Image (cartoon, rainbow, N blue to C red):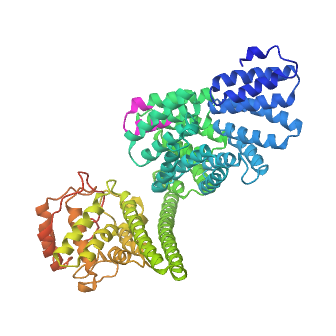
Amino acid sequence: MPPSDLRGGRPGERALALLEQAERLTAVDEARALQVAELALAAAGEEARPRLRAQAHHLIGQMQARRGDGERAAHHLEAALGLFLALGDRRAEGRVRRDLGAALLDQGRFREAEGQLTQALGQSAGGEEGRGDILNSLAGLYHAAGQYAESLDSLRAALGEFRQTGDVVGEVKVLCNLGTLLTSLGRYPEALEHLQAAYALSTGPARAQLAGHRSQGAMLLSLGALLLDMGDPREAQRYFDEALAFGQHSGDQVIAANAMLNRAEAQQALGEAAAARAAYERALDLAREGQYRQVEASALTGLGQLLMAEGQAVEAESAYRQAGEIARETGDLEGQLYALLHLGEVQERLEDLPAALGTLELALSLARGMGRPKAVCDVHRALYPMYARRGDHARALSHLEQLYQQEREILNAEVEQRVQTLTGNFELERAQHQAELTRLRLVAAEEARALAEEEVRERTHSLEQAHLEVVIRLAVAAEYRDDSTGEHTWRVGQMSAAIALRLGLPHETVELLRIAARLHDVGKIGIPDRVLLKPGVLTEEEYRHMQQHTLIGSRILSGGQSRLLQMAEEIARAHHERWAGGGYPLDLRGEAIPLTARIVAVADVFDALTHDRPYKAAWTVTSALRELRRLSGISFDPAVVEAALQVLPLPAAGQGSSGAEESPTRGPADT
């Protein structure tokens, strides 16, 4: 029924009929639904129907929020809240506070958003519809404040709520946000896992529900952000362009503004300065049109970086000051922190050393208050040369000492966290496998023994295959940090198996070694990037850090019941021991070194020598084989070298070269 057909309706009925029609239209034609809802609002005012007016304001606010018009959405939602408060409708009040908090969050009005969302959460119960949205929005606030652990907890709670209520759209939305947060924390495998889950839902039975929904644009943005953070700006730009097209087609200005901002960051990473500047300026325009303060601040920061690179320090200083002011107004602590850091750098460039020192001291105080140890390091790293330049050597030394201490604490915390996470995952796998086998054996004892034992054999085989897949994935995940192709571990496994076969080892042992060898450097997942990815020669201290990967790897793999994991553990621990002594970590020598580790040591070094590394060019195969002969009896078991010379080189898995790997030229001393 078109709205004009309702103008002659009975008094008191026209507003209700228009509102019901608007609600029906939201699923098929939201633009038309918005027009009808506006008519319903006017009719409710004429008919003095406060509840209908409140409902109309709420519906219009929800639609405006979905369209990305945060300012209008907040206006209508605030009006709805006032009316429901006057009516004493607590349930409706909670729903409006939830939507108002989300709209305020889009605008970067964090303090106001937090107040509304906190009250809404207090008025909701577990499993109640809408509670997941509240938790999801609160996670956005925590992220902006640099409270990453709280943000992660809130998103996980939101995911549980959406799954409990069967809200697939909400589930996809939270999975995308988890992907974005984990990307920002550098936890790429977990980020990818969540984004893949979101993609699977969006292309499955719930595809129709998600058609045209903002979560589709959010998923594109999250995937692009992951690729950008992983160093693939070209592919990331493709996703940002798709998100931009989605935002423009759907009229969602929030998605469009964020897509334009991210597109600018990708272009900046590609060195396309002119295109990046145009994109930042367009993102700035979109942000100001929609009052998206956080996007505005980020665009100003990006412009400031471009201006600094172009030597326009005065203009860059102005951009950073504006970004910092917006961050202060909105309560965006992370935005304030990075605006201060950049501002201090540009002030030094402008030869205003006192101002630069004052700005960076403020940044240091803020970073400490937020509990951001890496940002604390960044500030110390900027401050100590400034104080030295000023002639205040005591303060310069103090900042240098604090930088050293903070970096050591970060390193220790990162290593321990990575080891605990990986060890915990393996222990969980083992416990689950053992519990399942125990259950099946009980069935075998109580019921048809022969049938159940067959099931045990089948299940054992299935679990072994699953375990094998976990092991291989772990190897790839560990290597991905310094070898994006994943081919190095594959080649080492193939070469190790070929050498073992030549030595006459049993076929079963050869096949286990083919897999276990791939885990030789799993401990590198606990080595910080500044050491692992360093392009030059390592210092003595950095070299000692690198040596720890053997112990970290053996700890991760320790306690395994399968022969595969036991073999992988001994390889991870001993593949850097030397035949004549002087290796690490235990200074084993001769046949005290496990044979599997002696084999992998030869395959590992040969592959490292014959592929490019950040610190050296690839050697020829002839030169690499000559080096193996030279090190026979020194670093390597002569029998293993002799077997290797008869089977190497093997064909590569692909054309890409591997990432950084230790070789005889890697450390500050001969390895």
| Quadrant in the picture for residue 624 | bottom left
* Residue 33 drawn in magenta: no
Camera sees residue 297: no
Relative image position of residue 100 (x, y in whole percent): 72, 38
Q: Viewer-proximal residue, 374 or 200?
A: 200
Q: Viewer-proximal residue, 601 or 461?
A: 461
Q: Is residue 144 left or right of residue 123?
A: left
Q: Is residue 537 above or below residue 70?
A: below
Relative image position of residue 421 (x, y in whole percent): 50, 67
- Quadrant for the N terminus, please: top right
Relative image position of residue 350 (x, y in whole percent): 48, 38
Residue name at image x 83 percent, y 17 percent: 9
Q: Is residue 43 left or right of residue 599?
A: right
Q: Is residue 509 above or below residue 241?
A: below
Relative image position of residue 36 (x, y in whole percent): 72, 22
Most prominent secondary structure in the magenta stretch?
Answer: helix
- Quadrant for the C terminus, please: bottom left
| Figure disc tally | 0
* Residue 273 drawn in magenta: yes
Q: Viewer-proximal residue, 438 or 366?
A: 438
Q: Is residue 44 above or below residue 482?
A: above
Residue name at image x 71 percent, y 30 percent: 23
Camera sees residue 421: yes
Residue name at image x 66 percent, y 22 percent: 32
- The residues colored magenta run 261-276
